[in-house]
Amino acid sequence: VECGYLNCPLPYNHMMTMYLENGKLEKIPELIKMLKENTTPDVVAYSLWLTMCQSKNDVETAENVFLEMKKAKLEPNCITYSILASLYIKKELNHKAEVALREMEQRVSRKHRSGYASLISLHANLGNKKEVDRIWKTLKSVFYKLNDEEYNCMIGSLLKLGELEKAEKFYDEWESISPTGDSRIPNLLLGEYIYNNQIQKARNFFDRVVRKGIKPSYTN
C-alpha cells in the first residue's frame, strides 16, 4: 500500500526532521496538527515533537507531549527518554533526568547500541562518575569490540568530569586496539592540554600522534 499523506505519518516525520535540521521549529506544531487530522502519530513523530520541545527548553510542553504519547498506548523507546533526559539536564531538573535515564537504560540493547554512548554522555553531563564507569563496563560486557564512537564518547565524558589521567588511559587503550586513526579522539586530549595551558605536553602528544600516522585536526 502506498504511504501517502492521508494514511501514514512517514512523510510528516520526514518534513519535521527537515524543519528541525534547519531550525524552523515554528513549523512543527502546524505539521503535528495536519498529521493528526489525517492519520495517527507514531513513536518517531512524538520523538520529533519532543526534540522541538528540547530545542526550545520547553519542559511543560514536552511533558504534555509525553503524556499524550502514553495515552495513545505507544511505548516510549530509548530515544524518547534520551530526549527527555537531555532537556531535564539543561533545565537542571536532575531528579527527573535520573528517572528518565533509568527508563532509557532499560530499553538499550544490542539492537540499540548507540544508546550506551548516549547514556554515558548524559550521565557525564549530570556529573555521575560512577554511572559513567558502570555503563562503560556494561557496554564492554555486551560487545566484544568497542568502536571509535564509543571511545570518543567515553574519553570526552571523562574530560568533562575532570578525569584527565583516566581519559589518558582510555586513549592508550584505544590507540593499542584501533586501526582507524580517527583524529577526533586524539583531538580531545590535544584540546584539553591546550585549554589547560599544558603546551609542552600538547607538543609531545602531537608528535606521538603524528608518529602513529594520525593527522590531528584540532582547532581552537
Image (spheres, rainbow, N blue to C red):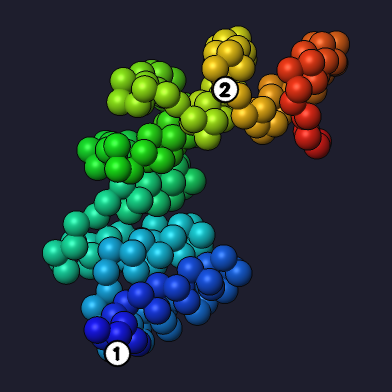
Front-most of 33 and 58? 33
Under circle 2, the secondary element is loop
Quadrant of the rendered image containing residue 165: top right
Q: How far from the left and from the top, in percent, is residue 56?
A: 51, 62
- Label for residue 178? 2
Query: Residue at the spot x=78%, y=33% of the render?
Result: 218
Q: Is residue 124 among what the camera can see?
A: no
Query: For this view, does 190 lie left or right of residue 126?
Result: right
Q: Report the number of discs.
A: 2
> Within 10 Å of the Cα at label 2, are there few (<14), some (14-19), or many (20+) other Cα atoms?
some
Front-most of 186 and 220? 186
Which of discs 1 and 2 lies nearer the camera? The answer is 2
Q: How far from the left and from the top, in percent, is residue 1?
A: 24, 84
Q: How far from the left and from the top, in percent, is residue 111?
A: 30, 43
Quadrant of the rendered image containing residue 209: top right
Query: For this view, does 201 lie left or right of residue 133?
Result: right
- Label for residue 6? 1
Give the vertical position of 164 relative to 187 (above or below). above
Query: Residue at the spot x=33%, y=64% of the render?
Result: 44
Which quadrant of the figure contains the C terminus? top right
Quadrant of the rendered image containing residue 53: bottom left
Q: How far from the left and from the top, in percent, is residue 92?
A: 45, 42
Amino acid at the residue labelled 1: Leu
Mark 1 vs mark 2, CA separation in Å: 48 Å
Amino acid at the residue labelled 2: Ser
Q: Earlier in the sequence, mark 1 or mark 2?
A: 1
